[in-house]
Amino acid sequence: MDNILIEPTFNTPYVSIDYSKGILEVRGSSSPINVLAFYQPIFEAIRDFSSSAPTISADFGMEFMNTSSTRCIFLMLKELKELATTGKEVTVNWMFEEDDHEMLEVGEDFQELVDVPFNFVETSLERVEKNDH
């Protein structure tokens, strides 16, 4: 199972999956034209965590998400919850910009919907370099 690295573009976030360390990272802005085509391989990759590290840390640092992307992030969290029901220790680190109360509320709503531990981290999100694609 190969690790995954998706470089960000103007419409898609940075995504990194490191199976040996049990780390999923999604950062940046998300408004792909075909949201399912972008996120489907990530859903499948999350399922592959079932045969890797016993703990999973999922780090989300979203600057912007359109409605379709918000739904896909929720589906990713549901996949992580499913892994937690199989005995994996799953923690979500929800990072949001200082004073971005809307993104904090989105994370709080997600936490209520999926029963996995969330850490809310107010931070100055590191800007992700974007490709022009």
Image (cartoon, rainbow, N blue to C red):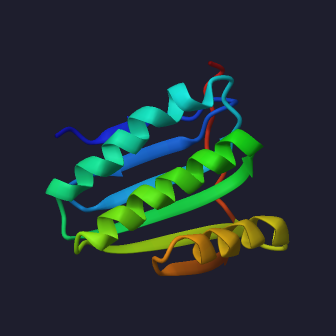
In the orientation shown, which residue stands out farthest toward the top? 133
Going 47% across and 59% down the picture, which residue do you hit? 78
- Asked if residue 75 lies left or right of residue 1, the reply is right
Res 43 → quadrant: top left
Going 57% across and 35% down the picture, which residue do you hit? 8
Residue 54 drawn at (x, y percent): 19, 70
Residue 27 drawn at (x, y percent): 58, 51
Residue 99 drawn at (x, y percent): 84, 73
| Residue 66 appears in view | no
- Asked if residue 73 lies left or right of residue 97, the reply is left
Q: Which residue is nearer to you in this view: 114 or 16?
A: 114
In this picture, is 82 found above or below 8?
below
| Residue 89 appears in view | yes
In this picture, is 110 found above or below 8?
below
Residue 131 drawn at (x, y percent): 61, 26
**Quadrant of the frame with the N terminus:** top left
**Quadrant of the frame with the C terminus:** top right
Going 24% across and 62% down the picture, which residue do you hit? 21
Number of numbered discs visible in the structure rendering: 0
Q: Which residue is nearer to you in this view: 60 or 44?
A: 44
Going 66% across and 29% down the picture, which residue do you hit? 32
- Asked if residue 73 lies left or right of residue 20, the reply is right
Q: Which residue is nearer to you in this view: 85 or 58?
A: 85
